[in-house]
Image (tube, rainbow, N blue to C red):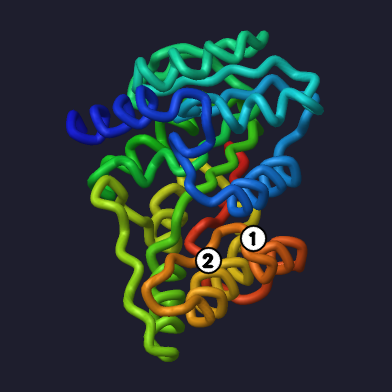
Amino acid sequence: MNDILEFWNEQARTHGTDLAATMPDPLLKCLELAALRRHLDPALDTIEVGCGNGVNLLHLSETFTGRLTGIDFSPDMIAAARQAGSAIDFQVEDIFNLRGQWPQIFTDRCLINIPRFDLQIRAAINLAAALAPGGRLVLIECSAPAHARMNEARARVGLTEIPNHWHNRYIDERKFIDALKADLQHIETDRFSSLYYLISRVFNAKMTPEGESPDYLAEINRIACDLPSVGDFGPHQAWVFRKR
């Protein structure tokens, strides 16, 4: 965890408030934000756990009327988030030491930075404990099975595997959801990135000339971003829960 913390501190020092601090693909970030808007109530007080440099909350603040709070274990990420000068409350805090009761909590690729499945479950139980009764939890995290299916599709057209980043542990969502049944009711899984991954990481990657890197902003990717998602090829998913 110390190595992961230092990685994110360095990302913040290098990129500051820029999206590149936490996400290299701006179209995928648009899909994440759209999923958050679908599944969160803009009128409720909301906390993002693992807020990074605050990009999500700054975007949501344009339409959300409830109080917004962001916490992260990286002091440098929180320092970058505060540079925006907004009314959002950004604080350095650890997911394993949450305080308060919230009607609504969300994460965005936070749990995948925890290197063991048992600790990911413990963190999710802590999130549930910080929810008010009947509160909503939206987890945008990465599915290990969907990531494997995307790589299988790449292999079928002669492309190499896209590995996980060293600091990420993708999650088997079925085991994860099952482990939380006592604390959280699973409402739905939104596989919002499936079509986008299939087109951007398979079609666009295959059409890119050898020796060049695929363009995240290629027109075919933009089209994929605007279409309804189908299938289960995208690791980025939204898992929506209600506290029992």
Q: Which residue is tagged 2? A: 234
Which one is in front, 120 or 76? 76
Residue depicted at 39% across the width and 16% down the height: 93
Which one is in front, 5 or 117? 5
Are the residues at dot 2 and dot 1 in contact (C-beta closer than 8 Å)?
yes
Residue 56 placement, left or right of 5: right
Rounded to the nearest angstrom, the CA distance separating label 2 from label 1 is 8 Å
Question: Of helix, strand and loop, which one carries label 2?
Answer: loop
**Amino acid identity at mark 1:** Phe
Residue depicted at 52% across the width and 31% down the height: 18
Badge 1 crowding class, 10 Å Cα cut-off, few under 14, some 14 to 19, many 20 or more, is many
Residue 78 percent location from the top left of the image: 44, 17
Above/below status of 115 relative to 192: above
Residue 11 percent location from the top left of the image: 35, 31
Residue 90 percent location from the top left of the image: 52, 13
Q: Which corner quadrant holds the C terminus?
A: top right
Q: Which residue is tagged 1? A: 192
**Amino acid identity at mark 2:** Gly
Question: Of helix, strand and loop, which one carries label 1?
Answer: loop
Q: Quadrant of residue 106?
A: top right
Residue 194 placement, left or right of 213: right
